[in-house]
Image (tube, rainbow, N blue to C red):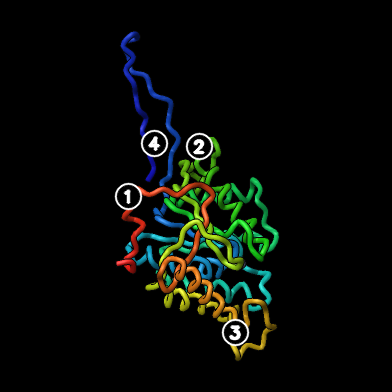
Amino acid sequence: MVCDHTRFIFLPYYRKYVPLPRRKKIIVSDIKLHILAIAAHPDDVELGCAGTIINHVRKGQAVGILDLTEGELGTRGTVATRYEEAANAAKVMGVAVRENAQMADGFFKNDEAHQRKLITYLRRWQPEIVLANALEDRHPDHGRGGRLIADACFLAGLSKIETTYNGLPQKAWRPKRVFHMIQDRLLTPTFLVDITHSFATKMDAIKCYATQFYNPSSAEPATYISSSRFLDEVASRDTLMGKRIGTQYAEGFICENFTGISNLDALILPTMA
Ligand SMILES: [Zn+2]
């Protein structure tokens, strides 16, 4: 949608209408997302927060995913297989959109160029909530990516930072909340989301990455994430998180500022009945 009507204001002293300063053309996002999950590598989102994503998709909300890199430094598979696997996993989770920002795996930075690139995506999709990598983790891309995403979310709300999409200026947009997922390191969560009913679908989405995880018929080199133990460890982590809130499975999130609720009922889970 483009707005470029010239508007006038009546000035009584001069008894005439004068045109208001011409407004810049504003392009509204091509798809409005409720949640945007952003992470360094294709498969991070599946491992860290697929259950939460599926919960929201099942509520009928639009959820999107932005992978920062193509995972080109991954020991197993290729960029082409990663794209195919990411698309299949997106279908399993039911997300509305998934794109790749094509930043350099292992070497992207939290600098102005990368922040501006992310700001363009944030203003285009206008998510209310952003899910991001943890601020510290085993892979250095995760911590750096988590900080980059949080910084870009803040900066996207500053109207004097000008960005364009499809050749037109974008409107400033700041997501209301940024939550960091817990992936490899067992960090202490700020809050936990019950994923008992979406856990099986989450594991189906993870298994779409057939080149990355355990596959006894693969002839590719073994890695940290390709052992048969790794997927069991993901399930164990989600079980451990669930135990803390009395559910079978849960995903934990960390936020840098306080979380508030409008009433106490939001803290009662159906499993407590
Ligand atoms: Zn990763």
Q: Which residue is mark 4?
A: 4
N-terminal of the two: label 3 or label 2? 2
Q: Could you tell me the amino acid type at mark 2?
A: Ser
Q: Which residue is mark 2?
A: 159
Name the one closer to the observer, 25 or 190.
190
Would residue 92 be visible to someone looking at this image? no
**Residue at point 47%, 77% (across, down):** 203
N-terminal of the two: label 1 or label 4? 4
On residue 228, the disc is 3
Labelled pair 4, 2 in contact (Cβ < 8 Å): no
N-terminal of the two: label 4 or label 2? 4
* Residue 219, quarter of the rendered image: bottom right
**Is 21 left or right of 133, judged from the image as shown?**
left
**Is 58 left or right of 92, judged from the image as shown?**
left
Q: Secondary structure at mark 1?
A: loop
**Residue at point 62%, 80% (across, down):** 226
**Residue at point 33%, 18% (across, down):** 17
